[in-house]
Amino acid sequence: MSHHLHYRFFRPGLGLALCIGIAASAQAATRMDFSNEYNANSIHAQGDAYFIEQVRELTDGEVDITLHTGGSLGFKSGDHFYAVADNAIQIADTLSGTMSGIDPIFLLSSLPFVVDGVEQAHQLYEIARPHYDTVFEDNDQILLYASPWPASGIWSQDAVTSIEALEQLKIRTFDRIGTETLRNAGASPVSLSWADVVPQLATGGIEAVLTSAEAGANGSFWEHLNHFSGIQYAIPLNMVHMNRDAFDALTPAQQDALREAAQRTDEHNWQAVRERTEINYATLEEHGIEIHDPVPAEFQQALVDAAAPVISDWRETIGERGKTIFDSFHNSNTQ
């Protein structure tokens, strides 16, 4: 309760009931901070804004969440897991692969060439969701919803449509899996957090970027690059996770509202990503980017071959969980 309210409370002639009413309304809204490394126009920030809107509506404004985009709270995706566990921030939107040091399960959605599109990516997420939930629960957090990216491709100065074009190419990747795959394919990959990509492009530290048409459009990559190859590398996920104590401090009705809002946002995000690539490609064409999609079959096959050992290493590391997930995924796609 603020000093202002104490002052009101003891002012003569002001009815006690009225004071209590003022105090209650001043304290009613539970405030939370939500960190996101990407800019406000990104598909992730838009999904997060949708979630906040749903929470506001379902709790009648009792839970007030502030979204901080562009890493403005000073946290990158790589910092989020522990920042949320420690309640330094209550909620964060985090690129899954940056949490691979916590548990290799977080690399699942960025395994290359496992899914052939959004439907399969959604299936894989549904199958793996209980495993994600467990890791968050073990670390005093809850997983609210996923935020899928449109498929990752290669942004570059010169066209990358052959394995020769990848030779020694200084290309940014977003996790260990991408780094290993592209190294196997002959490139010179560098793993960089999103915030560091544009500065590195501007100074020539990198010549190409493994990311979606979406991310490149948000970063105005056409200022530095001329080509996008739609290799359908992966449909990686961001995860939106919340501090467990902050969740437990809510009333049961507010907790239900948050879960309902999360469920709605999950559905909203999977729908949004289906429509996004078309919109992104139109933007790229407007800015004179040459799009190569599909890429030549032999190039695609060379990339798939480069990824194969990386996937089998991952499966070995993760053991039984990986087998369960892949068996289930395989079965749902062969019926």
Image: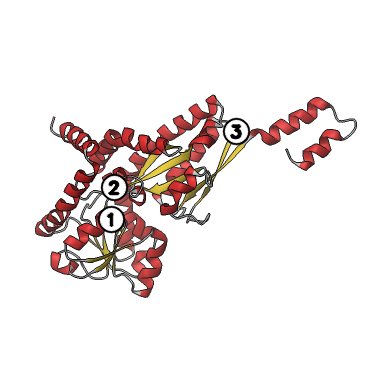
> Going by the picture, which residue comes out furthest to the bottom?
203
In the image, 46 versus 251, the foreground residue is 251
Q: Quick one: label 1 or label 2, which is nearer the N terminus?
A: 2
First in sequence: mark 2 vs mark 3: 3
Identify the residue position indicated by label 2 in the image: 107
On the image, the x and y values in percent for residue 204 come to 33, 74
Q: Is residue 306 left or right of residue 279?
A: left
Residue type for callout 2: Leu
For disc 1, the marked residue is 176
Quadrant in which the C terminus is drawn = top left
* Outermost residue to the left: 298
Corner quadrant of residue 230:
bottom left
Q: Residue at x 33, y 65 (%)?
A: 287
Nearer to us of marks 2 and 3 is 2
Q: CB of mark 1 within 8 Å of CB of mark 2?
A: yes
Residue 125, compared with residue 74, is above or below; it is above
Asked whether the residues under the numbered discs 2 and 3 touch, taking CB atoms below 8 Å apart as contact, a structural biologist would say no
SS type, badge 2: helix
Q: How far from the left and from the top, in percent, is residue 36?
A: 46, 50
Q: Residue sitting at 74 percent across and 29 percent down?
A: 21
Image coordinates for residue 167, horizontal then vertical, percent: 17, 69
Q: How is the image coloured?
A: secondary structure
Marks 1 and 3 sit apart, C-alpha to C-alpha, by 41 Å
